[in-house]
Amino acid sequence: MIRPETALITGGTTGIGRELALQLARAGTKVVVCGRRQEMIDEVVRAVPDKIVGISADVSDPDRAAAVVAEAIQKLGSLDLVIANAGFGINKHASKLQPSEVVQVLALDAIGACVTITAAIPHMLSRGRGHLVGISSIAGMRGMPTSAAYSASKAALSTFLESIRVDLRSTDIKVTDVRPGFVDTPLTKKNKFPMPFMVSAEDAARRILRAIARDRRVFLFPAPLAIAAWLLARMPRWIYDRLAALLSPDRGATR
Ligand SMILES: NC(=O)c1ccc[n+]([C@@H]2O[C@H](COP(=O)([O-])OP(=O)(O)OC[C@H]3O[C@@H](n4cnc5c(N)ncnc54)[C@H](OP(=O)(O)O)[C@@H]3O)[C@@H](O)[C@H]2O)c1
């Protein structure tokens, strides 16, 4: 799909989602963004008022996530592109992680994203086309230290997208699994560990939209982290466990 006419972006009010919304809208796509904070929705809508509309919703509630897709179809008349982008992470050593935090991360990053994608499938099937995109992460390719819930949720999303892609293979619905490395956004501002090869949100959005236009199945970026992630994914467990524990931001928490 070169330029979609219409798009829904969950978490489209800050960071990567906001940049995706702005770049799509400036290229002529009608975009629905969703997020929880109305003031952030208003700010992105004001940037391109004739192309962007907002929906205030918490998509960690699966019923609300499905309703957002229905509302977006109602507002735009159709949906060519759905980007399940809303997500957040908690960086905590397993010894400090709370059960409620695990639930929060999985509810948004895994369940919210998978429900958003699923809810759009019947509409796209009825139109005979569309593009489903999930913003997963390089962190989902292995169980990263201090990121148990986040890594697990992104692994779940990536696996989900792969299954959907196989199921929809004989249709004109495309599926893209985006796995960014570090991107400079409010999400990463709070990180206290080194974040090599970080790219700006603007640059990330440009790369993601290019990958979508090229119907990429899986898109990892930037290249140096993609190569590192590829190697990590193939590393024997006995080496990975030692290396990851050594590089952990909370090394020695249980010593
Ligand atoms: N930044 C990175 O380095 C990086 C790397 C790999 C993958 N990713 C993934 O990229 C995606 C975007 O991340 P980002 O860095 O751009 O984060 P961000 O700047 O914190 O943006 C998150 C967006 O999601 C919305 N959101 C959060 N919780 C929500 C909820 N329960 N319901 C609806 N909307 C919600 C936020 O708005 P409200 O708070 O107002 O709801 C905001 O619009 C996430 O899935 C993240 O895991 C990021």
Image: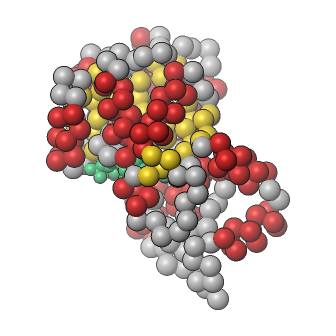
Residue 6 visible within the image: no
Residue at the spot 63% in from the left edge and 83% down from the top edge:
252
For residue 203, say whether it is visible. Answer: yes
The residue at the point 56 percent across, 14 percent down is: 171
How many marks do you count on the picture? 0
Quarter of the image holding residue 211? Answer: top right
Does 158 sit left or right of 241 as displayed?
left
Name the residue located 62 percent from the left edge and 62 percent from the top edge. Answer: 144
Residue 50: x and y, percent? 19, 22
Residue 56 lies, with reference to residue 186, above or below; the image says above
Q: For this rendering, which residue is in front, 217 or 205?
A: 205
Percent position of residue 214, x then y: 57, 21
Name the outermost residue toward the bottom.
255
Q: Position of residue 28 (x, y in %)?
A: 31, 18
Which part of the image, by quadrant, shows the C terminus? bottom right
Q: Residue at x 24, y 23 (%)?
A: 51
The front one of 9 and 43 is 43
Q: In the shown orientation, is residue 24 left or right of residue 252? A: left
Q: Is residue 40 left or right of residue 251?
A: left
Scheme of colours in the image: secondary structure
Q: Above or below — where is 202 with respect to 132?
A: below
Q: Position of residue 18 (x, y in %)?
A: 33, 40
Foreground residue, 56 or 171? Answer: 56
